[in-house]
Amino acid sequence: MSAQTKQAARLRRRRRVRAKVRGSADRPRLSVFRSNRGVVAQLIDDDAGHTLAAVSWTESDLRELARTEQASRAGQLLAARAKEAGVQSCVFDRGGYRFHGRVKALADGAREAGLEF
């Protein structure tokens, strides 16, 4: 039986992923945060420490959608904002979450809109 809480286990997985994934100006890191109510994603240039583009479930056109559809639409919006910022490809940081459900829907939505991982 595990002595860690769910949050501590996720934080440990997140740190393990972040040790291997690094974003740059040419290829920023697409960071995903998933809560019970929605999803937040950012394109981050780790060299400069800046966020190039971001999307949140609290935006008006995402708020009323079902959660999986919301994540897919958020990925499409993020890809459109990335193109405006001049970003063609990125590295995916799943944030310690499993790559399925809403995290996968966000990634698929971003790929459909033209962002390359």
Image (cartoon, helix red, strand yellow):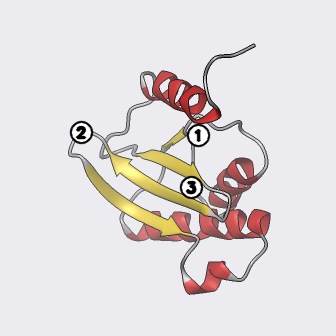
Could you tell me which secondary element the residue under label 1 belongs to?
A: loop
Looking at the figure, which quarter contains the C terminus? top right
CB contact under 8 Å: marks 1 and 2: no
- Which residue carries the number 1 mark? 94
Mark 3 is on which residue type? Leu
Q: CA distance from mark 3 to mark 1?
A: 16 Å
- Residue at 71% x, 83% y is 64
Direction top: furthest residue = 1
Placement of the N terminus among the 4 image quadrants: top right
Residue drawn 69% across the image and 60% down it: 109
Dot 3 crowding, Cα within 10 Å, few <14, some 14–19, many 20+: many
Residue 115 has which mark?
Answer: 3
Q: Position of residue 51 (x, y in %)?
A: 32, 57
| Earlier-in-chain disc, 3 versus 1 | 1
**Which one is nearer the viewer's eye here, 116 or 10?**
10
Left or right: 62 with respect to 105?
left
* Element on which disc 3 rests: loop
Q: CA distance from mark 3 to mark 2?
A: 20 Å
Q: Quadrant of residue 62?
A: bottom right
Q: To which residue does mark 2 refer?
A: 47
Give above or below for 102 relative to 57. Answer: above
Q: Nearest to the eye among marks 3 and 1: give it.
A: 1
In percent of width and height, residue 73 lies at 67, 70
**Residue 6 point in image, percent of width and height:** 64, 33
Amino acid of disc 2: Asp
| Label 2: how many Cα within 10 Å (few below 14, some 14–19, many 20+) | few
Which residue is located at x 52 percent, y 68 percent?
Answer: 56
Q: Are marks 3 and 1 in contact (CB under 8 Å)?
A: no
